[in-house]
Image: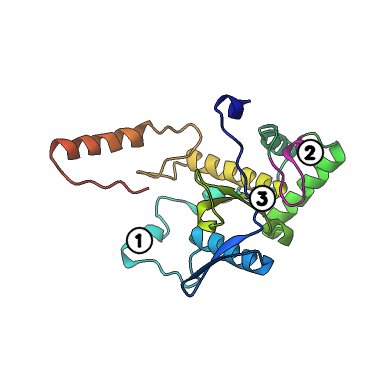
Amino acid sequence: MLNSVLNREKRHITLDRIMVTDQDALYISTDPIDIERIATHHYQSSVGIPPNDVSIPTAWLDEFNPQSHIDASNYQDLMNPITEDEYLQIISALPNNKASGPFTITYESVKYAGLLCRSLIITLLNACLDTTLISHSWRHALLFSIPKPMDWECHIDKTRPIVLLEILRKILGKILTQRISHIFISHNILKGSNYAGLPGGSTFDPIYTINLIREDAMRNNKEVWFLF
């Protein structure tokens, strides 16, 4: 209804053809091999996958060294077995009507599963924690191309990807994220400007700081850059 009120159509892409640039020649290819090759290369390079031999710049080495104020024992409970209460608390907060991953399992399927299925899922997730391994199939995802606010004209760089991960992998990630956040808060691990994104936190302080820097630059005619 919203699209109708705004006189806006729902836009989508059928990736059955793609623009190819080959030695200054420009043409549209419908060859599935060309489409897969160009799309794969584009999306792999667009997310900035780092090379294998990444070295930390000298100026940043100290930032990546173990910090003296952090006690390693703070993390001793991070890989504890998942309890049923913890699992239920996580899945109860999962949103409905979201797209599924490669196995077509939805959040609703997990939320309303029976006792046996729930027990098997918890056993599987605990096996991942115990072995520190995940299923190889969880590394697969569904990638969909959607158009940017322009006519895509078969140019892959005028699209952006949406990646759908496996639901059980996302649940395990949510459990670990919640545990890590609790450790950070309980032991005051993140200090200085490293506080964004924790439960109970606020964007007020960083926004206030940025605004003061901006006002100072304007008042004193200074050049200032904000990098995100």
**CA separation, marks 1 and 2?**
46 Å
Q: Considering only order in the chain, which callout, 3 or 2, is on the residue closer to the N terminus? A: 2
Three-letter amino acid code of the residue under disc 2: Ser
Residue 225 image point, x, y percent: 26, 47
Label 1: how many residues lie within 10 Å, few (<14), some (14-19) or many (20+)?
few
Residue bearing the label numbered 2: 109
Residue at x 65% of width, y 64% of height: 30
Q: Main secondary structure of the magenta part?
A: loop
SS assignment at label 1: helix
Q: Against 91, is 103 above or below?
A: below
Measured from the top left, where is residue 121 in percent x and y? 78, 46
| Residue that numbered label 1 is attached to | 62
**Residue at mark 3:** 165
Distance from the alpha carbon under mark 3 to that under mark 1: 35 Å
Name the residue: 68% across, 65% down: 32
* Magenta region: 99-111
